[in-house]
Image (tube, helix red, strand yellow):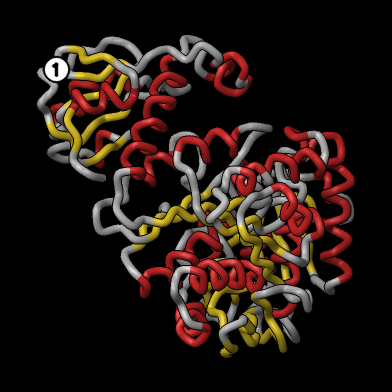
Amino acid sequence: MLPITLTEVAAVTGGRLHRAGGDEVVTAVEFDTRTLAAGGLFVALPGERVDGHDYAGAALAAGAVGVLAGREVDAPAVIAPPVPDRATDGYLAATDPDGHGAAVLAALARLAGASVAALPGCTVVGVTGSSGKTSTKDLLAAVLAPLGETVAPPGSFNNELGLPWTALRAGAGTRHLVLEFSARGAGHIAALAAAVPPRIGVVLNVGSAHLGEFGSPAAIAQAKGELVEALPADGVAVLNADDPAVAAMGIRTAARVVLTGRHPNAHVRAEDVHVDAGRARFTLVAPGGSAPVALRLVGEHHVANALSAAAVALELGGTPEGVAHALTLAEPASRWRMELTERPDGVTVVNDAYNANPESMRAALSALASIGAGRRTWAVLGRIGELGEGSDEAHAQVAAVARELGVDEIVAVGAPEYGAAREVPDVDTALALLHAELRPGDAVLVKASRAAGLERLAAALVDPSRLEGAR
């Protein structure tokens, strides 16, 4: 971020100075006292277990010059103004009854927007979709880096805290700022886009992730389309032509539309797609030419993500050859997303335990079938969250897909909804089962929604010595 004084922070956020002279210079913003350094502004947020306001002293000891707070603290601070309509957001109202967190988040959003608006020559690229946001964000970082300094979020920093925090990583030399936009309901993406407006917006797909919160696929599509509605007339909307719900969003934006996909009408498309051991190869075809791509990411579904990233890079000065080369070199960058590990005994472990929805489950199972061709395959699956009333049916359909793909063993961990599978109650029991029955050469997929905690199982599979404790 560009250096800014506490007086300027107060002016930008609408807050007031508290125990501060105002001349203190902020050079970074952090919400974790462990990452603070000299010149930092500590963002004090109340949580379920601890309240960041109680750590104002620790923040100063770590080098912070002040605190962005929702109430008065024993430290130099900018006190954020209340948010009158906070109660309209049921999530915030439930988790932040005093409104201190909502006030701080609103102030943080204003600070991020002002900081990015002051950057010379920085293009903001926003990405949304029911699945694939983080993988596409990583691919965008890979293809844009050769074209100029690029800032992208680590992991899945895509909400009202993570997005502005990421935006505040951008500095005077930043040419591209990549942001993930997520939503728990209508209006969330619109609010984030109003805070830090994108010039290029990418919509990947409309699936059933968070269906329980949105109520219907149409409501999900409406929410995801808020990103393209926020684009300026001189902006670009990159839409997946292979997803009818996404392609239809073209009428909702004033920006120029670029279609991606395998559809013959796509402006940036993939031809001659084939998959070898779970990794896809294809020819990238664009108005400026074509070039071969060999992805290192596991799963054919990454073809669509790669095309979206390619379209953005081509808009920002890349060539088909250069973009294809960058895509081919791109390595997995975010943990627990189709991480493939070959054990010394020949067992292949695919850790996709970060999150799940029915669409990403199908994609991961398809990858498992490709990786495990001619071998014994295991799908170790946990519960898919936030599906609402259709949860049982969705889980049963995932199990049916696994059987159709020829997966040999389906193990349901604490998820009886999968039906005809080998059900175990918890991670430890699953580890004991796998310890007893895995054979050299087997291929194992571990996947579930984040709350299932199956990353521990995957980690133990990668390091077989950790399985000993499960005997």
Residue 412 % position (x, y): 75, 52
Residue 250 makes an appearance in the image? yes
Q: Neighbour class for label 1 at 10 Å: few (<14), some, many (≥20)? A: some
Is 231 above or below relative to 134?
above
Residue 308 % position (x, y): 60, 67
Is 320 above or below relative to 186?
below
Residue 402 % position (x, y): 82, 65
In the drawing, does residue 428 fall left or right of residue 16? right
Residue 357 % position (x, y): 72, 51
Q: Quadrant of residue 338?
A: bottom right
- Please name the residue that numbered disc 1 is placed on: 20
In the drawing, does residue 426 fall left or right of residue 265? left
Residue nearer the viewer, 366 or 148: 148
| Residue shown at 65% from the left, 74% from the top | 303
In the drawing, does residue 306 fall left or right of residue 50? right
| Residue shown at 62% from the left, 64% from the top | 435
Residue nearer the viewer, 232 or 132: 232
Is 130 above or below relative to 176?
above
Q: Quadrant of residue 104?
A: top left
| Residue shown at 70% from the left, 58% from the top | 360
In the drawing, does residue 8 fall left or right of residue 180? left
Q: Looking at numbered disc 1 in the image, what kind of residue is underneath it? A: Ala
Q: Quadrant of the C terminus?
A: bottom right
Residue 432 makes an appearance in the image? no
Residue nearer the viewer, 370 or 444: 370
